Amino acid sequence: MGEAQDLPESLKPASLLTEELKLHLLRHMAEGVCLVRFSDSVIVYANPQLEQMFGYRPGELQDKSITALYEEGSEHPAQQVVDELRERLRQAGSTTSELQGVKKNGALLWCRARSSVATHPRHGQVWITFHEDITPMKMAEGQFAGIVSTASDAIICVGEAQRITFFNQGAVSLFGYTKEEVLGAPLDILLPERFRTNHPLFMKDFADMGSPARRMGERLPVWALRKGGEEFPCDAAISQMTSGGQHIYTVVLRDITERKQREDEQRFLAEVGGLLGSSLDYETTLENAAQLAVRSLADYCIIDILDEDGRPRCASVAAASKANQGLAQALRSNVDPSHPYLSREALLTGKATLRAQVTEEFLHAHSQDKAQLTLLRLLGPKSLMAVPLVARGRTLGAITLLSTNARRGYTAMDLRVAEELGWRVALAVDNALLFLQAKEATRAREDVLGVVAHDLRNPLNAIKLMAHELMEAQPAQVGPEEEDSPAEIILRSADRMNRLIQDLLEAGQLDAGTLSVELTAVAPLTLLREVVAQMKPLATAHQLQVHLPERLPPIRGDSGRLQQVLLNLLSNALKFTPPGGEISLGAEAQPNCVRFWVADTGPGIPQEHLPHLFNRYWQGDKRDRRGAGLGLAICKGFVEALGGRVWAESQVDKGSTFFFTVPTLLVPLDPPG
């Protein structure tokens, strides 16, 4: 045997290797080896491994044509395969190829064949081929190719010239092209026009990076183009490899239209909630709703509201484009319920309607008059949705959304978002209406209270005046059994009625936000001494203790309102503390505020009652009607109006302590006037 380029070292000519030793080495190699005569392609030697690989008995392949190993085992005739192999060997001296072979029993197998030319002492020029069985690997590749071919994701391969070389069934379904239409075509046909210029630059950058793979669109979504001209967002990953000296790029794409719509929907609805909750003004709520709709869902938005008589009126309109705002405002006209209009079905049925395609007949059938028909034609709606505004089982109105883009026809998914918008707008409108009604009710109550207070105080003043005259006319009673005179009882009752009237007025001012406070620098020690001076004559049956530090910082408050708070708390303490009990008040400096307190040794308050103490009209003992239940609520309103807070602590049978804070004066107040 002579030299061969790809022979292993053990087979290269050497004086120490005899012919017999060389055959011994071939016989014991792991690969299947055969020597083939160049002149007629006949096998002159086959080692046992090759015979076993192809299913032949020992010596059975001897003198057979090499074509026997490839008969019916290739898409090309076996003789053609052998002729091509021999020609490559003649030109290059060696070659490696993957060949499909056939066993003696007809089973197919794949071999990686490494062949090289050699010279045999008896057979002349031969080639020696080493066969490696790669059937398992090829089967795995075939399965992978099948998976790739049928994968739901689009898998596309392009060469260096950016022409499509592979287009799986997933890509066919995604883009709408057949394989025959795209194979060999430029990749540009799958890209929106605005991306075609920069795409080659992206591919070059990716190739220069040397990275085998990367995700695309990590910062901005990747957009692709279907055969019908529809653009869609997608997730994409790209990989690169070299095969046969050529660069091959593989892109895997997945349509994320629905996912992106859901994400956009969540962002939109979150924005809706924030903006609609920013105002309780009825008209502002409607304007905000219309502006939100044209921001993401529509080119035009019309909101019709039902009045108290159930008649619709156009309450708000908006356009996505400022240039079209004038056209939108022209839609704001009175709606005649006896004539057709766009939102009629939604208002009458309380159900959403979807018109994927708006026709001329539809516009004609839903126009109030010729002028509105002309206006709608100018708007040019291509698709329409109308959703009712329903809250607490009552239809308040409807939102009509118009799309003028022929490529954006509304779908069931769009309708779902519109219904979510309608639900949120309905709640906001209902809240705004309730707030408006509450304001009107509060205003009406204030008017009534004002009239009542004025009309009651006139006779009360007369009663008090007459009571004073009676007291002056009657001689004073002296003795241990001294009792209040009828005139004194009348006077106290009149004072109590006057206090109740004042409480009602102040509670109304707190509700209406019209309570006035005059902020000035207040000296806490002076405030407390004035309150004690007023209360001492009324506390003769109790022990009144005052705890005052030497100094307290000035506070920012209203001296009159603060006196009222302290007097109210002290009056309650006197009312609920038995004679002989102890009542104390005091104050102390804390960070950024002064804390005041009034404590008593009365019966105390159950823990479950503490959270309700400052609620209006609430009384722990319903049988005790010595007040209207407004005193503590008014105290809370006064303190909070001054920037402080109020609370109570109590233990049954041990007494109660009421606290409130007032901010200290950090900067000088502006002089009045």
Image (tube, grey):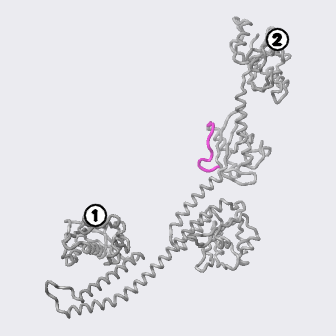
Q: Which residue is mark 2?
A: 124
Q: Is residue 213 magenta?
A: yes
Residue drawn 72% across the image and 26% down it: 134
Residue 414 image-quadrant placement: bottom right
- Residue 357 in the image: x percent, y percent? 73, 64
Does 65 appear above or below 603?
A: above
Res 513 label: none
* Residue count near mark 1 (Cα–Cα under 10 Å), binned few <14, some 14–19, many ≥20: some
Does 266 appear above or below 402?
A: above
The span picked out in magenta is 210-222
Q: Which residue is mark 1?
A: 651
Residue drawn 20% across the image and 92% down it: 472
Q: In this rendering, would 144 be left or right of 536?
A: right
- Residues 625 and 185: in front is 625
- Residue 388 in the image: x percent, y percent? 62, 69
Q: Is residue 508 magenta?
A: no
**Marks 1 and 2, how far apart at CA:** 119 Å
Dot 2: what SS? strand
Answer whether residue 556 is visible to the viewer in this image.
yes
The amino acid type found where label 1 is placed reads Gln
Does 375 appear above or below 65?
A: below
Residue 501 image-quadrant placement: bottom left
Residue 366 image-quadrant placement: bottom right
Q: How many marks?
A: 2
Q: State the predominant SS element of the stretch in magenta.
A: loop
